[in-house]
Image: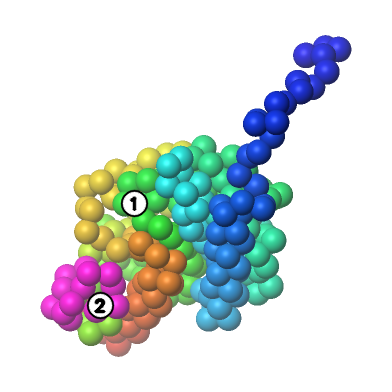
Amino acid sequence: MKGKKPRAFSRKEQSPPRAKDSSGARFSELAASLAEIGRGFYARGWALGTSGNFSVVVRREPLRLAITSTGLDKASLTPEQILEVDEAARVVRGSGRPSAETSIHLAIARVTGAGAVLHTHSVCSTVLSGLYAAKGGVLLEGYEMLKGLQGVTSHEHREWLPIVENSQDMARLSQTVAEILAQQPGIHGFLLRQHGLYTWATELAEAKRHVEILEFLAEVMVRSSALGHRG
Ligand SMILES: [Zn+2]
């Protein structure tokens, strides 16, 4: 490298997919939607104290995600705080550090083919993940609200919400998540123990609905348990 001038790029090489092209316009639109969703989740108490992270697939081949950068107060989340990352979690658009949990988002998008992945840290999903940890998951069954999950048409649906042991080793955790998703392709979400909820869907609006449905059901399960009605 010593004494070398930066390599001069040809004109053709100087046109990466940045702001002015259609992928830039799509990114801006998705970033605005993610910021709005994040502020909404904060207002519901599902992403307090900089917790939670949200992503949407910008491009499938090669995989590119728009994702919240780390350590942000979700109360005032703006589109400028959303980054674009590649399949190795490297930032390819925007500035800042991607969320620590980016590798989990990438694993979910890769294995399930989801178009959006949302992660919340609510009181109820945290409590529920501790209550049912010994069972390895929570069975949600018989609730009308289950019909809000993609592909579910009856309250008789049995939804298994696995509980995954929490870890700060993101490479290992994302590998565990990938394995669970490959083994249980029909699930709509999972809990990280004493941590929070992950859910996903084909479109961002559906993923947002999944958060609302699963957070509702988490609260129902926790309140039922407090009343002595064990699941
Ligand atoms: Zn988290």
Residue at point 46%, 44% (across, down): 63
Quadrant where the C terminus sits is bottom left
Specify how the rendered protein is coloured: rainbow
Characterize the magenta stretch by its predominant secondary structure. Answer: loop
In the rendered image, the residue lying farthest to the right is 3
Looking at the image, the residue that sits furthest to the front is: 11
In the image: residue 72, left or right of residue 85: right
Quarter holding residue 141: bottom left
Residue named by callout 1: 113
The tag earlier along the polypeptide, 1 or 2, is 1
Query: Where does the image place residue 104, in percent across and percent down from the top left?
Result: 45, 49
Q: Is residue 155 magenta?
A: yes
Mark 2 is on which residue type?
Answer: Leu
What is the total number of numbered labels drawn onto the structure image? 2
Q: Residues within 10 Å of mark 1 (few under 14, many from 20)?
A: some
Residue 197 seen in render:
no
| Rendered location of residue 98, percent (x, y) | 61, 49
Q: What residue span does the magenta drawing correspond to?
A: 146-159
* Relative side of 17 to 227, left or right: right
Residue toward you, 42 or 36: 36
Q: Are marks 1 and 2 in contact (CB under 8 Å)?
A: no
Report whether the residue tagged 1 is closer than 8 Å to ligand 1. no
Q: Which residue is mark 2?
A: 146
Circle 1 or circle 2, nearest the eye: 1
Q: Is residue 35 above or below residue 83?
A: below
